[in-house]
Image (tube, helix red, strand yellow):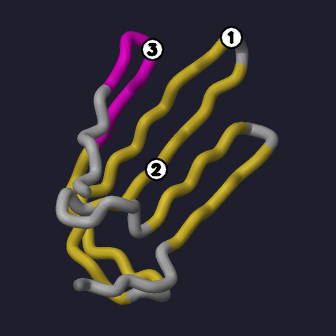
Amino acid sequence: LKAPPVEPTKDTKLVETKEKITVPAGTFDCLYSKTTSKTGEVEQTTEVWRSPDVPMPFKSVVSTPDMKSTTTLTKLEKK
């Protein structure tokens, strides 16, 4: 499995850069993407650190003015 690319939509701003990230599963070179979209009056920002070779993101952060959710990869086993 490979991670799909991030595709911007009409109401979305997309920024992508290469970064190195350290999470509990290790340190990785990855592609960082930040999307900002607005639905009605609510703006949502999604940040994702991923690699095309790993099907799950190393880290993701989704935030609105009222909440923030962070997910990090804690273990990676290569087979």
Q: Are marks 1 and 3 in contact (CB under 8 Å)?
A: no
Horizontal arrangement in the rendering, residue 37 relative to residue 58 (left or right): right
Residue marked by disc 2:
47
Please determine whether, in this image, residue 21 is positioned above or below residue 45: below
| Magenta region, residue range | 8-15
- The tag on residue 31 is none
- For the point 37% across and 17% down, the residue is 9
For label 2, count other residues whose C-alpha is less than 10 Å away and answer few (under 14), some (14-19) or many (20+). Answer: some
Q: Determine the CA span between mark 1 and mark 3.
A: 11 Å
- Name the spot of residue 40 as percent of width and height, x first: 68, 11
| Residue found at x 63% / y 27% | 43
Gap in Å between the C-alphas at discs 1 and 2? 20 Å
Q: Secondary structure at mark 1?
A: loop
Sooner in the amino-acid sequence: mark 1 or mark 2? 1
Which residue lies under the disc numbered 3? 11
Q: Quadrant of residue 20?
A: bottom left
Q: Is residue 14 highlighted in magenta?
A: yes
